[in-house]
Image (cartoon, rainbow, N blue to C red):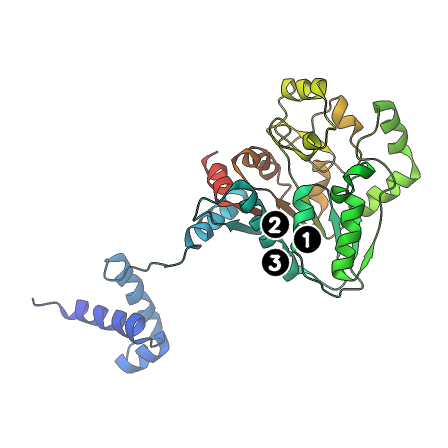
């Protein structure tokens, strides 16, 4: 079959670049054609179907999803754990925590300050984090502490454990995550102790937070902090998720109900003033709670799994 001279040159350039491995500059010298023309010819080869580029890796689809999510919600970084073997939910949750720990290790800086919420996900992230030495890093809680029988998930305990992993300093929150009453919450919110802690929390360089879906799965529920009446109120108020010291609606706005008023710590709205906010969560149910945080522009870094990512893109 006779081919035109233009097509022959196109095929030659594509073969030299993709099969032989020559650079565009080397091809330009070899064929006495300028480098910009070589670049245009390679693009033309793709458009004409002469060249089809495919990425053969199990994680390629997850990376594609991450780029789509980052573009849609204007995020700085999205890390997605692929679900190539339809792993059980707990295994995926552990993988997401491990990936979050790897990413955290890559962005640590000598003089940064880190704020933590609380819960099972953050506990898993810290478990997966290797030991470093950043003596000048400062770690502080973003919310109040939980009762002693739930120490493993407590923000103060997590701050201490992270400071051990990083060989750095840490602060503590000497007030509860959930006050016994709205009246007590009002008193504590006016105290110098809490205001000092919150001023410190809102000045961190990086906030690392988990997210819950209180109508389905949330650490608050699992640890027995919400009774049947609380759950009824949550459903009636159309609450979509909980993060830091907020129960929030579909738009990511804190719902000012009796439970939210008792929650002590920074609210989701305060996250907009923090340079980097890493949100970690996995599963389709968590996607329903992550979405409002993305809509509210409270998140700059998202670590999740493929199922949640697909659900977020479908919303």
Residue 74 visible in the displayed image? no
Secondary structure of the residue carrying numbered label 2: helix
Q: Position of residue 275 (x, y in %)?
A: 69, 50
Q: Nearer the viewer, residue 113 or 42?
A: 113
Q: Nearer the viewer, mark 2 or mark 1?
A: 1
Q: Residues within 10 Å of mark 2 (few under 14, many from 20)?
A: many
Q: Residues within 10 Å of mark 3 (few under 14, many from 20)?
A: some
For label 3, the residue is 102
Residue, x 48% and y 45% (percent of image)?
87
Alpha-carbon span between mark 3 and mark 1: 11 Å
Q: Are marks 3 and 2 in contact (CB under 8 Å)?
A: no
Q: Position of residue 293 (x, y in %)?
A: 61, 37
Secondary structure of the residue carrying numbered label 3: helix
Residue that extends furthest to the right in the rendered view of this protein: 192
Q: Nearer the viewer, residue 141 or 253?
A: 141
Residue 8 lies, with reference to residue 129, above or below; the image says below
Disc with the residue nearer the chain's start (2 vs 1)? 2
Residue that extends furthest to the left in the rendered view of this protein: 1
Alpha-carbon span between mark 2 and mark 1: 9 Å
Which label was assigned to residue 97?
2
Relative to 296, 13 lies left or right: left
Residue, x 34% and y 80% (percent of image)?
26
Q: Nearer the viewer, mark 3 or mark 1?
A: 1
Q: Are marks 2 and 1 in contact (CB under 8 Å)?
A: yes
Relative to 198, 296 lies left or right: left
Residue, x 11% and y 67% (percent of image)?
3
Choose top left, top right, bottom left or bottom right for residue 143: top right
Residue 229 visible in the displayed image? yes
For label 1, the residue is 127
């Amino acid at each position: 079959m006779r081919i035109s001279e233009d097509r022959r040159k196109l095929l030659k350039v594509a073969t030299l670049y993709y099969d032989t491995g020559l650079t565009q500059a080397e091809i330009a010298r070899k064929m006495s054609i300028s480098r910009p023309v070589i670049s245009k010819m390679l693009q033309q080869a793709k458009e004409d179907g002469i060249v089809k580029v495919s990425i053969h890796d199990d994680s390629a689809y997850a990376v594609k999803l991450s780029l789509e999510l980052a573009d849609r919600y204007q995020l700085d970084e999205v890390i997605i754990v692929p679900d190539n073997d339809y792993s059980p939910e707990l295994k995926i949750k552990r993988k997401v925590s491990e990936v979050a720990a790897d990413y955290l290790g890559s962005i640590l800086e000598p003089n940064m300050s880190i704020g933590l919420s609380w819960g099972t996900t953050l506990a898993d992230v810290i478990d997966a984090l290797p030991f470093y030495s950043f003596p000048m890093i400062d770690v502080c809680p973003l919310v109040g502490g939980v009762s002693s029988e739930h120490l493993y998930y407590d923000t103060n305990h997590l701050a201490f454990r992270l400071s051990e992993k990083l060989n750095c300093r840490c602060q503590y929150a000497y007030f509860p995550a959930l006050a016994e009453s709205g009246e007590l919450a009002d008193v504590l919110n006016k105290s110098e102790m809490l205001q000092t802690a919150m001023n410190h929390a809102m000045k961190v360089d990086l906030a690392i937070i988990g997210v819950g879906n209180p109508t389905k799965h949330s650490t608050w529920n699992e640890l027995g902090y919400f009774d049947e009446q609380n759950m009824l109120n949550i459903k009636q108020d159309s609450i979509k998720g909980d993060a830091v010291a907020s129960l929030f609606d579909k738009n990511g706005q804190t719902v000012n109900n009796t439970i939210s008023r008792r929650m002590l710590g920074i609210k989701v709205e305060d996250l907009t003033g923090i340079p980097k906010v890493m949100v970690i969560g996995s599963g389709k149910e968590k996607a329903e709670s992550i979405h409002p945080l993305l809509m509210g522009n409270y998140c700059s870094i998202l670590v999740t799994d493929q199922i949640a990512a697909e659900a977020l893109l479908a919303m």
